[in-house]
Amino acid sequence: MTENILHTLAYDLLPAVRMQMPGTIPPVLTFSGDEPFREAARSPQAFEEWKRVWRGAEPSFTEVVWSDAEKAAGTLTAAMREEQGLLMLKDAGLLAWGPGKDITDRLLGGEKTEKSKAPSGPLTGRIALITGAAQGFGKGLAEHLAADGACVMVADINGETGRETVRQLREKTGNPNIAFVGADVTKSDSVDGMVRATVLAFGGLDIFISNAGILKAGGLEALEEQAFDLVTQVNYKGFYLGTKYASRVMKTQHCHAPQRFMDIIQINSKSGLQGSNRNFAYAGSKFGSIGLVQSFALELVPDNIKVNAVCPGNFFDGPLWSDPDNGLFVQYLRAGKVAGAKTIEDVRRYYESLVPMGRGTTVKDVYRAVTYLIQQEYETGQALPVTGGQVMLK
Ligand SMILES: NC(=O)c1ccc[n+]([C@@H]2O[C@H](COP(=O)([O-])OP(=O)(O)OC[C@H]3O[C@@H](n4cnc5c(N)ncnc54)[C@H](O)[C@@H]3O)[C@@H](O)[C@H]2O)c1
């Protein structure tokens, strides 16, 4: 299978087919170009030979005009009349569709299908991709999205934790429509691969949450230039790259479902609204990202893609602050940053006292803002503070 075919499948074909399928809730589409499907897809003869050993639901062999995605989408949609099934796509591999990824995975595995276990909720039928979701805010948001019925792709540079997170979230939410993709948001090829993997696993993309972010604090004399570059690359460039590839899929969906709204949401920070002493690399990357949010919002309005940011205050319960070895509470205690503080609790209380509402931001606070932005059909280009009153808009 060539790169061109994979590109067409992910950016043009599957998102178009998913939007054209009948019914109010689009099905999950899962594609596999693995052996032996790729071999069987080479010709009708190879397909017939493979079918002799295949024990699963019977697919039909489908000629696809790869150079004309519009035509190809029409052919596929016409062939996908049942609620679930399999199609062998010539020169590519096997496409499964059904009401959940548990079903499409079983179909691709040649197993018998049962009723889908996917929970239903306000986001049933929506596909979300969230970066930096192995831990922290990203993991918490992925859990809420999955509990609300969405298909969720967890993307992270940390494969081990990311895969374990998916296992935990499937168990906790009972939603089988959660998958992992390894991705470095600073690298164009990797981000392209992340978006393709999402579409090949689920069939499209409706909600992209750019959450991966890092913090390297330090004043002008202390902060190394490389640290400045890395923070800028992850927090600022990573958002640009994610939007570039995610919006391609969303634009295709818009062509086939012009009334549907889609969302790109950056998890920004209160430091994107107010300067942060000796933390300029982080604050600069977050302020800059709000410039990107506003500019992308203007560019993508015609495609019904809303682009907004959520700007949380400090997440004291997350690993950044509470990690027992390296968290900011321990670091600030050791560095004597808070006068008179003798314990981690003293440091925590001091930071909580800076928030008018007296506590740090939680995942739930941020998720409420995310769901507001998804539900709202008359707002784009905004940076929504969730800071307990610590930062107020001017
Ligand atoms: N923790 C806070 O107090 C706080 C407050 C406001 C905003 N935020 C923002 O929320 C977002 C998440 O923060 P968090 O505290 O949950 O962070 P975290 O450190 O707990 O998690 C960040 C995740 O991003 C991943 N990551 C790092 N570099 C990556 C890369 N190049 N490609 C892909 N993944 C990468 C990490 O592996 C990790 O899983 C960030 O954008 C951060 O700026 C955090």
Image: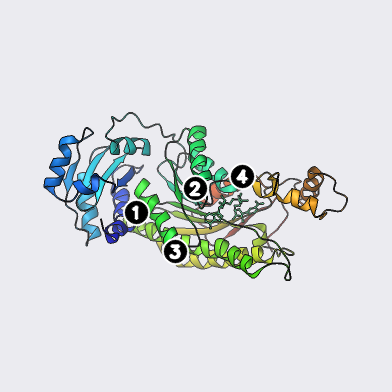
Q: Which mark is residue 188?
A: 3
Mark 1, secondary structure of its residue: loop
The picture places residue 378, in percent across and down from the top left corner, at 50, 57
Place of residue 148 in the rendered image (x, y in percent of width and height, measured from the top left): 49, 39
Amino acid type for the residue under numbered disc 1: Ala
At a point 83% along the width and 53% down the height, the residue shown is 338
Label 4 to label 2, Cα distance in Å?
22 Å
Q: Nearer the viewer, mark 3 or mark 1?
A: 3
Q: Amino acid at mark 2?
A: Gly
Q: How is the image coloured?
A: rainbow
In the rendered view of the protein, which quadrant contains the C terminus?
bottom right
User: Going from the N terminus, do you reach mark 4 or mark 2 first?
Assistant: 2
Look at the image and tell me whether residue 24 can be seen.
yes
Q: Is mark 2 within 8 Å of ligand 1?
A: no
Which residue has dot 2 on it?
A: 159
Tell me what residue is drawn at x 17 percent, y 42 percent.
60
> Where residue 4 sits in the image (x, y, percent)?
28, 61
Counting residues from the N terminus, which is met first, the one under dot 3 or under dot 2? 2
Proximity of marks 1 and 2: CB atoms separated by less than 8 Å: no
Q: Which residue is mark 1?
A: 257
Q: Residue under circle 4?
A: 363
Do the residues bearing badges 3 and 1 touch, measured as CB atoms within 8 Å?
A: no
* Mark 1 or 4, closer to the camera: 4
* Displayed quadrant of residue 223: bottom right
Pointer 2 local density, CA inside 10 Å: few below 14, some 14–19, many at least 20: some
